[in-house]
Image (cartoon, rainbow, N blue to C red):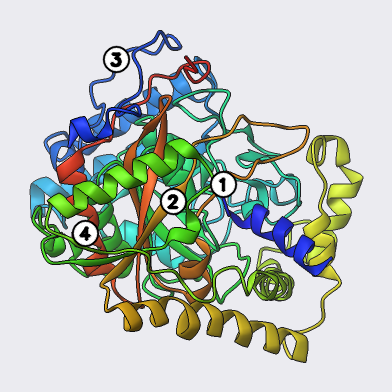
Amino acid sequence: MINRRELFRNSLIAAGAVAAFSNIDCAPQQQSGSQVSSFELDELTIAQLSRFTSRSLTEKYLARIDALNRKGPELRAVLEVNPDALAIADLLDQERQSKGPRGPLHGIPVLIKDNIDTADRMTTTAGSLALEGSTPEQDSGVAQRLRAAGAVILGKTNLSEWANFRSTHSSSGWSGRGGQTKNPYALDRNPSGSSSGTGAAVAANLCAAGVGSETDGSIVSPSALNGIVGIKPTLGVIPGNGIIPIAHSQDTAGPMARTVTDAAILLGALSGGTDYTRFLDAKGLRGARLGVARKFFGYNRDVDKLMENCIAEMKRQGAVIVDPADLPSYNKYNDAEFDVLLYEFKADLNKYLAGLKSNVRARTLKDIIDFNEFNARREMPYFGQEIMIMAEAKGPLTDQAYLDALAKSKQGARAEGIDAVVKQFKVDAIIAPSGGPAWLTDLVTGDHDAGGSSTPAAVAGYPNISVPAGYSRGLPVGLSFFGPANSEGPLIKFAYAFEQATKFRAAPKFLPSAPLA
């Protein structure tokens, strides 16, 4: 996959219908998995969960986390639970009785990534021991909007430490605080990063839905590899304040859920009230012009076969397929993107750290680097901090090198990329494999490239949706729909119609490994 870590490695190198799917698994094979008890809330949607009291939902999900996170399959998807979750649930139940629900998320338990600030008794650490005990004084915009919608913030999820911007040889889903997150479909496989904990938790039914964040691939990739729906919205649709940053020109939070409907509901709350459910149309592919970005194919034979079958199904649903519809700037600005991220990481992280409470030990990126060196046994047992060191060496955002790299990457992703394809081929959206299937977690050499198509939309700041597209040897594969700025509505319509036509989502079996026969 071309997630952030693989992008960085490439940049460094550059600088120096059922029958139609018969050849590949359409659902995880039935094999004996870990001893995981049946769960009353398994695969229930937000609408179905609204029949329960918030207290009951919160108790059940907390018990599920207790049973699967550090016990049983030991998913390590959740770093901490909210000690006030049950009290919040009780208040929301009382409010429902006295005033009625605020909306569809009223009383619904949601997990959020541990780089999203909450002004409560939970910490926000980006998975790093350097920020252990950090309790921000203000809610992030994401937390504010979740609370306003009546959601119960159930806890914080594990992640690739510092959102996977630490080492060129990292293992996605590993953090100093939480250890290695596992993929619930095959426990020896990787959940992808950096929103790995959110992806695994949502897939394993540890919550109703979750919030991740993305700079390049960190929502859509873990969504694809964990068999769920992920929406990376247009930059600015969701407020970015109070999120431990990588780069302000690309960072955004986004919803991760088991269905397109639930993802649309959560996106509506995070955006401040836009009703994205009005785009849920089971016939939404009729007449849609979809361009196939062929240059993102070729990483995996099974994935390519699944994509061909997906394209055939979309044609059956009435879509007009323009094939190929490749981005002319493909792979021409990775080096520029990486430079932008290095510059912005140093500037943005220093600003974030400076605003924390005085008892936090790290106030600058240099402090983080020094802390990791001093605590190398706990913080760097498997991989180092090469990217952080490169970022620390960068100058201010007034450097001409930064300004040139920013202009090059935006031009390449927008005018010479997505916008060019939309204009030339008159397409409504572009489709490509999200990436995957999941690779074996490797703490010796780090992640393994599994393909992916996240970079154009990530750099452009444009929306991208990944939806389940089938299975390869029991491992989920995702299909991405991406398009121009503020095209979330049409993308949701296409993704929903595809989901309803195929209904690939199947709950994980917590197998010890993927069935290879």
Q: Amino acid at mark 4?
A: Phe
Residue 24 place in picture, x, y as percent: 35, 29
The residue wearing badge 1 is 193
**Residue placed at 76% from the left, 52% from the top?**
168
Query: Taking 437 as reference, is 26 left or right?
Result: left
Gap between marks 3 and 1 measured at Cα: 28 Å
Q: Which mark is residue 38?
A: 3
Query: Taking 114 as reference, is 509 left or right?
Result: left
Element at label 2: strand
Element at label 3: loop
Gap between marks 3 and 4 measured at Cα: 33 Å
Gap between marks 2 and 4 measured at Cα: 15 Å
Which residue is more in the foreground, 474 or 291? 291
For residue 496, say whether it is visible: yes
The crowding category of the residue bearing disc 2, from other C-alpha atoms within 10 Å (few below 14, some 14 to 19, many at least 20), is: many
Is there CB contact under 8 Å for labels 3 and 4? Answer: no
Element at label 4: helix
**Residue placed at 35% from the left, 17% from the top?**
29
Which residue is more in the foreground, 245 or 234? 234
Q: Amino acid at mark 2?
A: Ser
Which residue is more in the foreground, 249 or 459? 459
- Label located before the other in sequence (3 or 2): 3
Q: Is residue 202 above or below residue 402?
A: above
- Label located before the other in sequence (3 or 1): 3
Q: Amino acid at mark 3?
A: Ser
The residue wearing badge 4 is 494
